[in-house]
Amino acid sequence: MKSGLAVLFMLALALTAGAQKKKELSTWVNVNYCLPKVAYDIEVTLECTRFIPGPYSNYAEKELRLKPEATHPREHWEIKDMRITPRYLPDEKAVYSVSATGEYTPVTLSLSAEGFLAGVSVGVEELGAKQKEMKYSENHPEKGDEINIMKLNTYNHLKEVLDTNYTFQEIDGEMKKIWDPIVRYVPKTEADNVKEAVSEIFRIRSERVKLLAAENNVPDGKSLEIILKEFDRMEANYMSLFMGKTEKRKVKKVVTCVPVRADEPVVAFRFSEKEGMSDAKNVSAIAYSLKIADVIVPVSKSLAEGDNASAIFYRVPAVGELQLLKGKEKIISFQVIVPQLGEVKRFPVDVISNEGLMLEFYPYSGALKSIRKK
Protein backbone atom coordinates (compact mmCIF):
# COMPACT_ATOMS: atom_id res chain seq x y z
CA MET A 1 0.00 0.00 0.00
CA LYS A 2 2.83 2.41 0.95
CA SER A 3 4.62 1.63 -2.31
CA GLY A 4 1.45 2.46 -4.27
CA LEU A 5 1.15 5.86 -2.53
CA ALA A 6 4.80 6.54 -3.27
CA VAL A 7 4.23 5.92 -6.95
CA LEU A 8 1.23 8.25 -7.00
CA PHE A 9 3.20 10.93 -5.15
CA MET A 10 6.15 10.61 -7.51
CA LEU A 11 3.76 10.85 -10.50
CA ALA A 12 2.16 13.97 -9.06
CA LEU A 13 5.58 15.57 -8.61
CA ALA A 14 6.51 14.73 -12.17
CA LEU A 15 3.31 16.25 -13.53
CA THR A 16 3.84 19.36 -11.42
CA ALA A 17 7.41 19.71 -12.68
CA GLY A 18 6.21 19.20 -16.26
CA ALA A 19 3.59 21.89 -15.81
CA GLN A 20 6.17 24.30 -14.46
CA LYS A 21 8.51 23.62 -17.40
CA LYS A 22 5.66 24.18 -19.85
CA LYS A 23 4.79 27.48 -18.19
CA GLU A 24 8.39 28.66 -18.40
CA LEU A 25 8.75 27.65 -22.10
CA SER A 26 10.80 30.19 -24.00
CA THR A 27 11.44 28.28 -27.25
CA TRP A 28 10.94 30.45 -30.33
CA VAL A 29 8.32 28.94 -32.67
CA ASN A 30 8.51 29.96 -36.30
CA VAL A 31 6.32 28.67 -39.17
CA ASN A 32 6.93 29.73 -42.75
CA TYR A 33 4.39 29.89 -45.55
CA CYS A 34 4.17 31.53 -48.95
CA LEU A 35 1.65 33.03 -51.33
CA PRO A 36 1.34 31.74 -54.87
CA LYS A 37 2.09 33.23 -58.26
CA VAL A 38 0.81 31.92 -61.56
CA ALA A 39 2.92 30.85 -64.53
CA TYR A 40 1.58 29.65 -67.86
CA ASP A 41 2.77 26.55 -69.69
CA ILE A 42 2.33 26.92 -73.44
CA GLU A 43 2.26 23.61 -75.30
CA VAL A 44 3.05 24.27 -78.94
CA THR A 45 2.37 21.66 -81.62
CA LEU A 46 4.45 22.25 -84.74
CA GLU A 47 4.44 20.52 -88.11
CA CYS A 48 7.63 20.31 -90.12
CA THR A 49 7.48 19.66 -93.85
CA ARG A 50 10.82 18.50 -95.22
CA PHE A 51 11.47 18.85 -98.95
CA ILE A 52 13.85 16.28 -100.42
CA PRO A 53 14.93 17.07 -104.01
CA GLY A 54 15.26 14.33 -106.59
CA PRO A 55 18.72 13.48 -107.95
CA TYR A 56 17.58 14.34 -111.50
CA SER A 57 15.63 17.51 -110.67
CA ASN A 58 17.72 19.44 -113.22
CA TYR A 59 16.23 17.29 -116.00
CA ALA A 60 12.57 17.63 -114.94
CA GLU A 61 11.66 20.60 -117.14
CA LYS A 62 13.52 19.26 -120.17
CA GLU A 63 12.28 15.66 -120.03
CA LEU A 64 8.85 15.97 -118.35
CA ARG A 65 7.92 19.64 -118.82
CA LEU A 66 7.49 19.90 -115.04
CA LYS A 67 9.09 22.20 -112.49
CA PRO A 68 10.16 20.63 -109.17
CA GLU A 69 8.94 22.26 -105.96
CA ALA A 70 12.41 22.06 -104.43
CA THR A 71 15.83 21.74 -106.00
CA HIS A 72 17.71 21.72 -102.67
CA PRO A 73 16.85 20.33 -99.21
CA ARG A 74 14.79 22.67 -97.04
CA GLU A 75 12.25 22.66 -94.22
CA HIS A 76 8.99 24.53 -93.72
CA TRP A 77 7.49 24.87 -90.22
CA GLU A 78 3.93 25.64 -89.20
CA ILE A 79 2.27 26.11 -85.81
CA LYS A 80 -0.73 23.77 -85.75
CA ASP A 81 -1.93 24.14 -82.16
CA MET A 82 -1.20 25.94 -78.88
CA ARG A 83 -2.55 25.14 -75.42
CA ILE A 84 -2.10 27.43 -72.41
CA THR A 85 -2.30 25.88 -68.93
CA PRO A 86 -1.89 27.78 -65.62
CA ARG A 87 0.64 26.43 -63.12
CA TYR A 88 0.95 27.79 -59.58
CA LEU A 89 4.38 28.32 -58.04
CA PRO A 90 5.63 29.74 -54.73
CA ASP A 91 6.17 33.47 -55.06
CA GLU A 92 9.69 34.16 -53.78
CA LYS A 93 8.65 37.78 -53.14
CA ALA A 94 5.80 36.77 -50.84
CA VAL A 95 7.29 34.43 -48.20
CA TYR A 96 6.14 35.08 -44.61
CA SER A 97 6.34 33.49 -41.17
CA VAL A 98 4.33 33.36 -37.97
CA SER A 99 6.47 33.48 -34.80
CA ALA A 100 5.68 33.20 -31.10
CA THR A 101 7.37 32.46 -27.75
CA GLY A 102 6.52 32.19 -24.03
CA GLU A 103 2.86 31.95 -22.98
CA TYR A 104 0.62 32.43 -25.98
CA THR A 105 -2.61 31.15 -27.44
CA PRO A 106 -1.56 28.88 -30.27
CA VAL A 107 -2.55 29.72 -33.84
CA THR A 108 -2.59 26.74 -36.16
CA LEU A 109 -1.88 27.07 -39.86
CA SER A 110 -3.04 24.78 -42.66
CA LEU A 111 -0.77 24.67 -45.69
CA SER A 112 -0.93 23.01 -49.09
CA ALA A 113 1.79 20.63 -50.26
CA GLU A 114 3.54 23.55 -51.99
CA GLY A 115 3.52 25.62 -48.78
CA PHE A 116 0.61 27.86 -49.80
CA LEU A 117 -1.53 29.22 -46.97
CA ALA A 118 -4.86 27.36 -46.84
CA GLY A 119 -6.34 28.15 -43.42
CA VAL A 120 -5.81 29.48 -39.89
CA SER A 121 -7.19 27.67 -36.83
CA VAL A 122 -9.34 25.52 -39.07
CA GLY A 123 -9.08 22.00 -40.34
CA VAL A 124 -8.77 22.01 -44.10
CA GLU A 125 -9.14 18.96 -46.29
CA GLU A 126 -5.83 17.58 -47.48
CA LEU A 127 -4.46 19.62 -50.33
CA GLY A 128 -2.02 17.82 -52.59
CA ALA A 129 0.07 19.37 -55.28
CA LYS A 130 -1.54 19.46 -58.68
CA GLN A 131 0.34 16.70 -60.41
CA LYS A 132 1.15 17.25 -64.03
CA GLU A 133 2.12 14.48 -66.39
CA MET A 134 5.62 14.98 -67.75
CA LYS A 135 6.41 13.86 -71.27
CA TYR A 136 9.73 14.01 -73.07
CA SER A 137 10.66 13.08 -76.59
CA GLU A 138 14.05 13.59 -78.18
CA ASN A 139 13.68 16.06 -81.00
CA HIS A 140 16.08 14.70 -83.59
CA PRO A 141 15.37 15.62 -87.22
CA GLU A 142 14.04 12.56 -88.97
CA LYS A 143 16.12 11.47 -91.91
CA GLY A 144 13.97 10.49 -94.85
CA ASP A 145 14.82 7.76 -97.26
CA GLU A 146 17.26 8.96 -99.89
CA ILE A 147 15.80 9.16 -103.37
CA ASN A 148 17.97 6.82 -105.39
CA ILE A 149 17.23 4.93 -108.58
CA MET A 150 19.35 2.09 -107.25
CA LYS A 151 16.62 1.31 -104.72
CA LEU A 152 13.99 0.62 -107.37
CA ASN A 153 13.36 -3.09 -107.78
CA THR A 154 12.92 -2.79 -111.52
CA TYR A 155 16.25 -1.06 -112.04
CA ASN A 156 19.41 -2.71 -113.32
CA HIS A 157 22.51 -0.61 -112.71
CA LEU A 158 24.45 -2.28 -115.54
CA LYS A 159 24.06 -1.90 -119.29
CA GLU A 160 25.18 -4.11 -122.12
CA VAL A 161 28.08 -2.86 -124.25
CA LEU A 162 29.24 -4.49 -127.50
CA ASP A 163 32.96 -4.18 -128.15
CA THR A 164 34.12 -4.18 -131.77
CA ASN A 165 35.66 -7.52 -132.68
CA TYR A 166 36.27 -9.16 -136.03
CA THR A 167 36.99 -12.71 -137.04
CA PHE A 168 37.90 -14.20 -140.39
CA GLN A 169 35.94 -17.08 -141.87
CA GLU A 170 36.15 -18.85 -145.18
CA ILE A 171 32.98 -18.36 -147.14
CA ASP A 172 32.61 -19.86 -150.60
CA GLY A 173 36.32 -20.45 -150.70
CA GLU A 174 37.12 -16.88 -149.80
CA MET A 175 38.32 -15.53 -146.41
CA LYS A 176 35.99 -12.79 -145.24
CA LYS A 177 36.10 -10.39 -142.27
CA ILE A 178 33.04 -10.88 -140.04
CA TRP A 179 31.99 -8.69 -137.13
CA ASP A 180 31.78 -10.80 -133.97
CA PRO A 181 31.09 -8.38 -131.04
CA ILE A 182 32.17 -9.16 -127.49
CA VAL A 183 29.41 -8.54 -124.93
CA ARG A 184 30.33 -6.91 -121.64
CA TYR A 185 28.47 -4.99 -118.90
CA VAL A 186 29.37 -1.56 -117.50
CA PRO A 187 27.68 0.76 -114.95
CA LYS A 188 25.08 3.10 -116.40
CA THR A 189 25.82 6.81 -116.57
CA GLU A 190 23.52 9.54 -115.24
CA ALA A 191 22.32 10.18 -118.78
CA ASP A 192 21.46 6.48 -119.11
CA ASN A 193 19.53 6.59 -115.85
CA VAL A 194 17.57 9.70 -116.85
CA LYS A 195 16.68 8.17 -120.22
CA GLU A 196 15.56 4.91 -118.59
CA ALA A 197 13.51 6.67 -115.88
CA VAL A 198 11.68 8.85 -118.42
CA SER A 199 11.02 5.81 -120.61
CA GLU A 200 9.59 3.89 -117.64
CA ILE A 201 7.31 6.77 -116.65
CA PHE A 202 5.74 6.94 -120.10
CA ARG A 203 5.58 3.14 -120.40
CA ILE A 204 3.71 2.89 -117.08
CA ARG A 205 1.26 5.60 -118.15
CA SER A 206 0.67 3.84 -121.45
CA GLU A 207 0.03 0.50 -119.74
CA ARG A 208 -2.37 2.16 -117.29
CA VAL A 209 -4.39 3.66 -120.14
CA LYS A 210 -4.63 0.24 -121.78
CA LEU A 211 -5.82 -1.32 -118.55
CA LEU A 212 -8.49 1.34 -118.03
CA ALA A 213 -9.62 0.92 -121.64
CA ALA A 214 -9.83 -2.88 -121.13
CA GLU A 215 -7.36 -3.48 -123.95
CA ASN A 216 -5.29 -5.99 -121.94
CA ASN A 217 -8.16 -8.39 -121.25
CA VAL A 218 -7.84 -7.91 -117.48
CA PRO A 219 -11.32 -8.23 -115.96
CA ASP A 220 -12.66 -5.61 -113.56
CA GLY A 221 -12.24 -6.53 -109.92
CA LYS A 222 -9.58 -6.99 -107.30
CA SER A 223 -6.87 -8.00 -109.76
CA LEU A 224 -7.28 -4.81 -111.79
CA GLU A 225 -7.26 -2.73 -108.60
CA ILE A 226 -4.00 -4.31 -107.41
CA ILE A 227 -2.34 -3.83 -110.82
CA LEU A 228 -3.36 -0.16 -111.00
CA LYS A 229 -2.10 0.47 -107.46
CA GLU A 230 1.23 -1.12 -108.32
CA PHE A 231 1.53 1.06 -111.43
CA ASP A 232 0.78 4.14 -109.30
CA ARG A 233 3.51 3.14 -106.84
CA MET A 234 6.04 2.53 -109.60
CA GLU A 235 5.27 5.84 -111.30
CA ALA A 236 5.53 7.73 -107.98
CA ASN A 237 8.97 6.20 -107.39
CA TYR A 238 10.25 7.19 -110.81
CA MET A 239 8.66 10.66 -110.61
CA SER A 240 10.39 11.28 -107.26
CA LEU A 241 13.72 11.02 -109.07
CA PHE A 242 12.78 14.26 -110.86
CA MET A 243 10.23 15.98 -108.64
CA GLY A 244 11.58 14.97 -105.23
CA LYS A 245 9.27 14.26 -102.30
CA THR A 246 8.03 15.73 -99.03
CA GLU A 247 7.94 14.28 -95.52
CA LYS A 248 5.96 15.60 -92.58
CA ARG A 249 6.39 15.20 -88.86
CA LYS A 250 4.86 16.79 -85.76
CA VAL A 251 6.83 18.15 -82.82
CA LYS A 252 5.51 19.25 -79.42
CA LYS A 253 7.33 21.74 -77.21
CA VAL A 254 6.40 23.34 -73.89
CA VAL A 255 7.58 26.77 -72.77
CA THR A 256 6.78 28.54 -69.49
CA CYS A 257 5.93 32.21 -69.25
CA VAL A 258 5.46 34.25 -66.03
CA PRO A 259 3.64 37.61 -66.26
CA VAL A 260 5.47 40.23 -64.20
CA ARG A 261 3.67 43.53 -64.78
CA ALA A 262 0.31 44.62 -66.12
CA ASP A 263 0.14 45.58 -69.81
CA GLU A 264 3.74 44.45 -70.35
CA PRO A 265 4.15 41.61 -72.89
CA VAL A 266 6.50 38.78 -71.91
CA VAL A 267 8.06 36.92 -74.86
CA ALA A 268 7.36 33.20 -74.52
CA PHE A 269 9.12 32.06 -77.72
CA ARG A 270 9.95 33.12 -81.25
CA PHE A 271 9.01 31.30 -84.44
CA SER A 272 10.15 31.26 -88.06
CA GLU A 273 8.94 29.15 -90.95
CA LYS A 274 12.49 28.10 -91.80
CA GLU A 275 13.71 27.12 -88.32
CA GLY A 276 10.58 26.51 -86.24
CA MET A 277 10.79 27.62 -82.60
CA SER A 278 13.89 29.66 -81.87
CA ASP A 279 15.50 31.46 -78.96
CA ALA A 280 13.67 34.45 -77.48
CA LYS A 281 16.71 36.62 -78.38
CA ASN A 282 16.42 35.86 -82.10
CA VAL A 283 14.84 39.16 -83.18
CA SER A 284 14.61 38.04 -86.82
CA ALA A 285 11.83 35.58 -85.87
CA ILE A 286 8.24 36.47 -84.93
CA ALA A 287 7.68 36.86 -81.18
CA TYR A 288 4.80 35.10 -79.43
CA SER A 289 4.07 36.81 -76.11
CA LEU A 290 1.69 36.77 -73.16
CA LYS A 291 0.24 39.98 -71.78
CA ILE A 292 -2.11 40.68 -68.89
CA ALA A 293 -4.32 43.60 -69.96
CA ASP A 294 -7.22 45.48 -68.36
CA VAL A 295 -6.00 44.57 -64.87
CA ILE A 296 -8.39 45.26 -62.01
CA VAL A 297 -6.98 45.42 -58.47
CA PRO A 298 -9.34 46.18 -55.56
CA VAL A 299 -8.46 49.52 -53.94
CA SER A 300 -7.43 49.43 -50.29
CA LYS A 301 -5.00 51.07 -47.90
CA SER A 302 -1.37 50.08 -48.16
CA LEU A 303 0.38 48.11 -45.42
CA ALA A 304 1.52 50.31 -42.55
CA GLU A 305 5.26 50.87 -42.69
CA GLY A 306 7.13 49.70 -39.61
CA ASP A 307 4.20 47.68 -38.25
CA ASN A 308 5.87 44.67 -36.63
CA ALA A 309 2.74 43.17 -35.11
CA SER A 310 2.36 39.48 -35.89
CA ALA A 311 -0.06 39.00 -38.75
CA ILE A 312 -1.27 36.55 -41.37
CA PHE A 313 -0.61 37.82 -44.87
CA TYR A 314 -2.91 37.00 -47.76
CA ARG A 315 -3.68 38.34 -51.20
CA VAL A 316 -6.43 40.20 -52.92
CA PRO A 317 -5.60 38.84 -56.40
CA ALA A 318 -5.86 40.86 -59.58
CA VAL A 319 -8.22 39.99 -62.41
CA GLY A 320 -7.30 40.69 -66.01
CA GLU A 321 -7.40 39.56 -69.61
CA LEU A 322 -4.68 37.12 -70.63
CA GLN A 323 -3.73 37.84 -74.24
CA LEU A 324 -1.67 35.69 -76.58
CA LEU A 325 0.10 37.97 -79.05
CA LYS A 326 1.75 37.22 -82.38
CA GLY A 327 3.97 40.23 -82.78
CA LYS A 328 1.48 42.98 -81.95
CA GLU A 329 -1.56 41.04 -83.16
CA LYS A 330 -3.87 39.57 -80.49
CA ILE A 331 -4.62 35.95 -81.37
CA ILE A 332 -6.75 34.88 -78.42
CA SER A 333 -7.68 36.15 -74.95
CA PHE A 334 -9.62 35.11 -71.85
CA GLN A 335 -10.22 36.29 -68.28
CA VAL A 336 -7.81 35.06 -65.61
CA ILE A 337 -6.88 35.59 -61.96
CA VAL A 338 -3.28 36.73 -61.51
CA PRO A 339 -2.20 36.54 -57.85
CA GLN A 340 1.18 38.27 -58.22
CA LEU A 341 -0.40 41.41 -59.73
CA GLY A 342 -2.78 41.77 -56.77
CA GLU A 343 -2.32 43.34 -53.35
CA VAL A 344 -0.98 41.77 -50.15
CA LYS A 345 -3.07 42.40 -47.01
CA ARG A 346 -2.64 41.43 -43.37
CA PHE A 347 -4.86 39.96 -40.66
CA PRO A 348 -3.54 40.44 -37.08
CA VAL A 349 -2.82 37.22 -35.20
CA ASP A 350 -4.03 38.63 -31.85
CA VAL A 351 -7.47 39.33 -33.35
CA ILE A 352 -7.66 35.74 -34.56
CA SER A 353 -6.65 34.42 -31.11
CA ASN A 354 -8.80 36.75 -28.98
CA GLU A 355 -11.91 36.48 -31.09
CA GLY A 356 -11.53 32.75 -31.72
CA LEU A 357 -11.71 33.15 -35.48
CA MET A 358 -11.22 30.55 -38.18
CA LEU A 359 -9.92 31.71 -41.57
CA GLU A 360 -9.94 29.81 -44.85
CA PHE A 361 -7.99 30.78 -47.98
CA TYR A 362 -7.90 29.70 -51.61
CA PRO A 363 -4.39 28.14 -51.77
CA TYR A 364 -3.86 28.68 -55.49
CA SER A 365 -4.74 32.39 -55.47
CA GLY A 366 -3.92 33.36 -51.87
CA ALA A 367 -7.35 35.01 -51.51
CA LEU A 368 -9.43 34.96 -48.33
CA LYS A 369 -12.28 32.44 -48.60
CA SER A 370 -14.14 32.71 -45.29
CA ILE A 371 -13.99 34.08 -41.72
CA ARG A 372 -16.05 32.51 -38.94
CA LYS A 373 -15.94 31.87 -35.21
CA LYS A 374 -15.10 28.55 -33.66
Image (spheres, grey):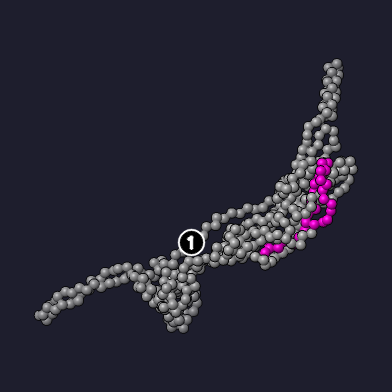
Drawn side of residue 139 relative to residue 314, left or right: left
**Residue under pointer 1:** 143
Identify whether 215 is placed above or below 352.
below
Drawn side of residue 97 relative to residue 329, left or right: right
Specify the farthest residue to the left.
173
Drawn side of residue 186 relative to residue 218, left or right: left
Question: Could one spot residue 46 in this view of the protein?
Answer: no
Specify the farthest residue to the top.
2
Q: In which quarter of the image is the N terminus?
A: top right
Secondary structure at badge 1 equals loop
Residue 285 within the magenta-colored segment of the rendering: no
**Magenta segment boundaries in residue numbering:** 297-325
Residue 302 within the magenta-colored segment of the rendering: yes
Identify whether 16 is placed above or below 320.
above
Query: Where in the figure is residue 295, as x and y percent of width and height?
Result: 77, 60
Drawn side of residue 181 relative to residue 188, left or right: left
